[in-house]
Structures are given as C-alpha cells and as structure tokens.
Amino acid sequence: MSSTADDGEPNLGGEDVAVTEQAAAEALDLLESEGMDVEESGLRLYVQQGGCAGLSYGMRFEHEPEADDEVFERNGLRVFVDDASIDYIEGSVLDYEGGLQGAGFHVQNPNVVSECGCGESFRT
C-alpha cells in the first residue's frame, strides 16, 4: 500500500509522516552526492529493537521502496516506511537540526511516552 502527497504540510493524523523543508533539502543533497536518482530513491525510516528505552530509529537510503512499504513524498523527498514500523511512527515529523552539538536528523514522534537520557531510544 502506498500513500503519496506533495504539499509538504505536516498532517499529524493517521499513518502520515511529515518532513520539514530543511530535512528534505539535507536528505536530497545526500542522495544526490551518493549518485542516487532522487525521483526513484528515498530515505527509509524504520524502528528497530534496541537502546536503553527499548526502541530506536534507523534511517538509510534505498534505490526504491519495497512492495509493502508506505511511501510519503514531502518537499521532494520520498520516505519509505515498512508495515512493522508505521504503527510506531505515524504522525511523526522528520526534522534536521544543524549546529556544533547534535547536527543531524531527528524524529519528533507524538507516540513516544518516554525516552532515554541520551535521546537515542524511546518507548511507545
């Protein structure tokens, strides 16, 4: 199943994942620097077991989505989310924060009930 929207506006209801303009721009730059086709490839966002709070986020670039992925297009970036992860991250916003300490991608997840002290893992 696939969901696609191009407006980039966060819609925090249902199985939606929003992406800020800054996060999309950073990810698209990285995709292009890897020589990947930004029309077909995208960023996989997933949840995995691990971390001191029980779950952690994972991200990687992929050339195309899997057949059963949810696909969200926001600000020109395609985001792939597998069926096992969507329940944990629905309504989330993928953001990018720059700076001297902690530059990188961050997930703002309304489903999180607690996080570890370092902010790298969570519990829903």
Image (cartoon, rainbow, N blue to C red):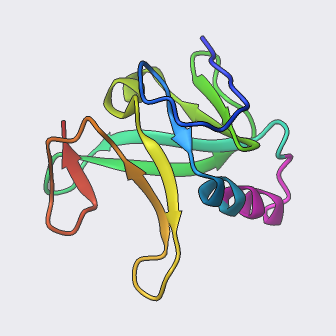
> Of all residues shown, which one is farthest toward the top?
1
Residue for point 76% across, 43% down: 76
Q: Which residues are magenta?
A: 27-37
Query: Residue 25's spot in the image, x, y percent?
Result: 71, 59
Could you tell me residue 70's position as x and y percent?
Answer: 57, 22
Q: Is residue 108 magenta?
A: no
Q: Main secondary structure of the magenta part?
A: helix
Total of numbered circles in the picture? 0
Q: Quadrant of the C terminus?
A: top left
Residue 80 lies, with reference to residue 122, above or below; the image says above
Q: Residue 46: give x, y in percent of width and height.
A: 44, 39
Q: Could you tell whether 60 is left or right of 5 in the image?
A: left
| Image quadrant assignment for residue 83 | top left
Residue 98 falls left or right of residue 51: right
**Percent coordinates x, y for residue 51 in the rendering:** 21, 55
**Rendered image quadrant of residue 41:** top right
Q: Quadrant of the N terminus?
A: top right
Please state which of residues 97 and 59 is positioned toward the viewer in this rendering: 97
Does 114 sit left or right of 92 as displayed?
left
- The residue at the point 81 percent across, 66 percent down is 33
Q: What residue is rendered at 29% in x and 38% in y?
A: 110
Residue in view at x 14 percent, y 67 percent: 117
Whether residue 35 appears in magenta in the rendering, the answer is: yes
- Image quarter of residue 109: top left
